[in-house]
Image: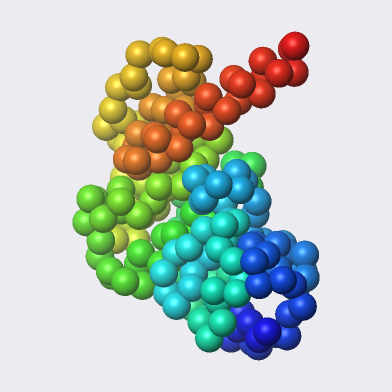
Amino acid sequence: MELQINDKTYQITSDAETPLLWVIRDELGMTGTKYGCGLAQCGACSVMVDGEVLRSCVMPVGAMAGRKVTTIEAVTADPVGQKVVDAWVRHQVPQCGYCQSGQVMAATALLKQVAQPSDEQIVGAMVNLCRCGTYNAIKAAMHELSGGTGAPAAAAAATTPAAPAAADGINKAAVAAAAVVGVGAVAAIQWSKTQKARAGKEQA
């Protein structure tokens, strides 16, 4: 089948049920899009399809026929994407950087749809999980991009909701950081539980 990615057309041989992520990475060699959870939860695999953010780890490539896919490799070809990347640099958002391609794609998609998003719209769109806890820097960069001045991380941290009480081994620090961007806290809880279960198996 033909697959349109980053304004180029590719003939691919992967089975139609193959997740788009693996076609992008393994068949086409574009490794900027990352594998995180494989469950469409963390957002590391985010790409844009016809301008909307989709999680490529669960999206069958067969569903992409006739659609326009954009990956992180082409994001700076778009003026909005370039502004996002520049803001990410100014606010020193990346730490390990593994999740940031997905974060940048989510931010770019939002700003292409809404030039000056409200705080509520930012919270609703920026739900990807970051294990390094860069949520305050992301929030500051998005505030700048939405027409604000870019609230410093310390100010953003002051608005962080209190973490839920410890239960079932949930990492309260991760949940508190994720709460800065709203429902990202749900993903943090799920990730923390997964990590606890994995640690238990390794010790067994």
Coloring applied to the structure? rainbow
Residue at x 64% of width, y 66% of height: 17
Side of 100 where 13 appears, left or right: right
Nearer to us in this view, 124 or 77: 124
Can the viewer see residue 138? Answer: yes
Which residue lies at the image location 53% right of the left edge and 32% below the top edge?
Answer: 191
Q: Is residue 4 left or right of residue 79?
A: right
Query: Which quarter of the image is occupied by the C terminus?
Result: top right
**To which quarter of the image does residue 9 belong?**
bottom right
Vertical relation: 166 (above or below) 133: above
The image shows residue 172 at horizontal and vertical percentages of 43, 20
Task: Please count the marks in the image.
Answer: 0
Residue at (49%, 78%) from the top-left corner? 78
Picture quadrant where residue 200 is located: top right
What residue appears at the point 39 percent right and 34 percent down from the top-left corner?
A: 185
Q: What is the x, y in percent for residue 157?
A: 34, 31
The quadrant in which residue 15 appears is: bottom right
Q: Nearer the viewer, residue 44 or 115?
A: 44
**In this view of the protein, which residue sits in the foreground, 54 or 72?**
54
Q: Is residue 174 left or right of residue 73?
A: left
Task: From this view, report whether residue 81 is shown above or below residue 107.
Answer: below
The answer to whether any part of residue 30 appears in the image is: no
Question: Residue 51, how many percent across, how many down?
Answer: 42, 74
Quarter of the image with the N terminus in it: bottom right
Q: Is residue 141 above or below residue 69?
A: above
Residue 36 location (% of width, % of height): 62, 46
